[in-house]
Image (cartoon, rainbow, N blue to C red):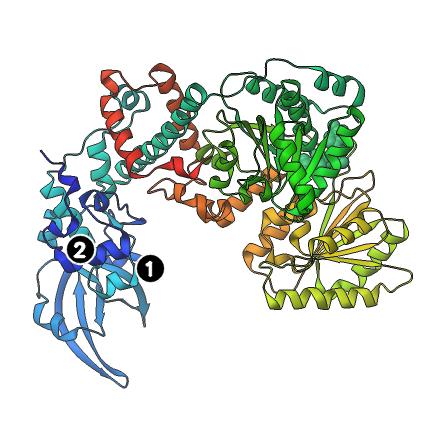
Amino acid sequence: MNNPLETPIEYLKGVGPARGELLRKELGIHKYADLLHLFPNRYIDRTRYYKINELQNSNAEVQVVGKVINIKTVEQKRGKRLVATFVDGTGEMELVWFQGQKWIRENLKINVPYVIFGKCTAFNGVFNMAHPEMELLAEHEQSLRSAMQPLYPSTEKLTQRGITNKVMNKMMQQLFTETQAKFDETLPPALLAELQLIPKNAALFNIHFPKSNELLAKAQFRLKFEELFFIQLQLITKNLIRKHKIKGHPFTTVGNYFNDFYQNHLPFELTDAQKRVIKEIRNDMGQPAQMNRLLQGDVGSGKTIVAFMSMLLAIDNGFQACLMAPTEILANQHYMGLSELAEPMGISIKLLTGSTKTSERNIIHEELENGSLPIIIGTHALLEDKVQFKNLGLAIIDEQHRFGVEQRSKLWHKNEIPPHVLVMTATPIPRTLAMSLYGDLDVSVIDELPPGRKPIKTVHRYDSNRLKVWAFLKEEIAKGRQVYIVYPLIEESDKMDYKDLMDGYESISRDFPLPQYSVSIVHGRMKPAEKDSEMERFAKGKTNIMVATTVIEVGVNVPNASVMVIESAERFGLSQLHQLRGRVGRGAEQSYCIMMTSHKLSNDSKTRMETMVRTNDGFEIAEVDLKLRGPGDIMGKQQSGVLNLQIADLVKDRDILMLARHHAIKLLKEDAPLAKPEHAALKNAFIALSKKKSIWNYIS
Ligand code: ADP
Ligand code: MG
């Protein structure tokens, strides 16, 4: 028999082609199953009935049982209204209509018990309710509709075209009638028992027609758990498959380069976190399966050296390694930093970006292909088809969220056996998000800063205090420090922003005049060569102030720069602010971050400023960011599709997520192919889900 839930929605009694079209367009409801999984946004508690003498003038929604004893039209300057007197034995109140008066007059029954529902206010000591929802008590008692009344997601168009919440509710009732409310159980009995989850049927019924608050809570818990559980199953299965099926080069030796570096060339003692992470990576790359690891570490936590030592492991085993960065500036920085480490060991390392000259480019192509170049650093230029490796063993990608998934897999396909992949990010991803999105990636975290760093002092100042801020900058410059002043330039093409930046640069140049001071500027409209030379002047200490846009956000490392001024800070998101702040605090000196804003701030902006002032902890900041913006925004559009959760909420339901993950891991350990008979239903649901919405596309 066909699954009734696959029936197109227009076949549901009371829907038809026109409404069907509307439901499809407005809510994406194509078939019965979609409607069934349209979960209410909230519920109105209709478990409670008020007596008229209990009413309060609070504008709260209340429900009263009583009768209409008379009805009259009241003429007013501004038009007519219909007023009914409603009594319940404890008192009387008024029901008022401004619209649809004729219909009410003709249909309202006098002296018959009604249940009324609506917002109640008092006027001259008399309580009244405008446009109450009304239902005959007799019908009310019979209807499937529950005490907790669901409010469904809707759109203006739907309401305009008569698909009100009430209609939605009726359709849902109809769906339950037609399908006889029989829905397949998807979770195994043992799990239901262990977690005391209510059965699927009961959960779906109570999510739409909750009989009580308690049952509603149980239904919500069961459905949230189920949703997160299946996502975790998908992610973890994928990880298992990769570990078993995707071959990788096992780096079996820890050889000369690694040991030589470790013993003779380490520029500083590694932190415990760095040591731990290197061990994790070494372990992974020692396996004959592809590594796919996310390396999270706050700005300045020292990811570069971890990357370098991972590369040494590749070289020790006769493979090449590459590092890809999202911008030319950053690629350049990496190149300089890594060259410094590689040079004493006689390791050849080159840079390939959009501005690499053709002659040089050709040489690089050749050396990569014949294997004489072991390490290449670059931008997207590395992805071009012309770039072929003799044997790429490790691909490191910095700041991964700037690269699409497609681009990443392009690197993979450069050789038959894919390289190990290490993705580095300085944007701490809240654990909940990481778990739901990257449940399939192994994660290493550097959660410790190198010793001796002084926490950056962060303050929030209003534009009106600029004179004082400038005086402070002069003091710091007098001590030999350097300063960043960053302007928002969200889109490089935005004219207004560009103008702000240039105006800012001019006034800064005036306030910090030559010859005492010198000011650099870097922005996206400059030619790469110009940018680089300005950057270099600043890095070498030839200029005191660097005026820039967010192009310096990622990776730039000038230890002598100790003050970061962020202009119009209210326009930056939290993670950007944190990234920018991470540009200072890299040297031995006390560093400062000064966020300048106007006086007018939204509540969210205030929260952002307060959070930045309060903490330097990237994870804490990421959690606040997640709360403020929601997961979709944080991961960007491309990945937010995964997070189209029907009922669970990654922020509020993190405990359920942990639980779901725990049980998914447990179950897969026990029965990874889901072959046991008691997992048959689970397997079916799992396959159906994987077909429907493939999370896989979104991730690596
Ligand atoms: P990020 O994680 O932001 O990429 P970097 O790798 O650029 O951080 O490191 C930031 C700075 O800290 C660099 O100047 C680097 O040399 C230094 N550093 C890294 N690890 C250590 C360590 N264990 N001890 C002292 N300094 C370190
Ligand atoms: Mg870095």
Question: Which one is earlier in the sequence, the residue at label 2 or at label 1?
Answer: 2
Q: Is residue 234 left or right of residue 248?
A: left
Q: Quadrant of ligand 2?
A: top right
Q: Is residue 200 above or below residue 538?
A: above
In the displayed structure, 269 sits above or below 76; it is above
Say which residue label 1 marks. 56
Question: How crowded is the residue under tag 1: few (<14 C-alpha within 10 Å), some, or many (20+)?
Answer: few
Comparing labels 2 and 1, the label whose residue is closer to the camera:
2
Residue 133 figure quarter: bottom left
The amino acid type found where label 2 is placed reads Gly
| Numbered disc total | 2
For the residue labelled by badge 1, is the local secondary structure a helix, a strand or a loop? loop
Q: CA distance from mark 2 to mark 1?
A: 42 Å
Q: Amino acid at mark 1?
A: Gln
Label 2 close to label 1 by CB (< 8 Å): no
**Ligand 1 contact, mark 1 (Cβ < 8 Å):** no
Answer with the quarter of the image where residue 253 lies.
Answer: top right
Give residue 292's position: percent from left, percent from top. Answer: 51, 28
In the image, taking residue 131 as reference, residue 175 lies left or right, namely: left
Of 280 and 186, which appears nearest the observer? 280
Q: Residue at x 23, y 54 (%)?
A: 24
- Residue 452 is tagged as none
| Nearer to me, 20 or 192 | 20
Question: 169 and 431: which one is in front?
Answer: 431
- Point out the image quarter for the N terminus: top left
Q: Could you say where residue 692 lies in the image, as x and y percent from the top left?
A: 28, 38
Q: Position of residue 48 (x, y in %)?
A: 25, 48
Q: Secondary structure at mark 2?
A: helix
Reading the image, the residue beneath label 2 is: 20
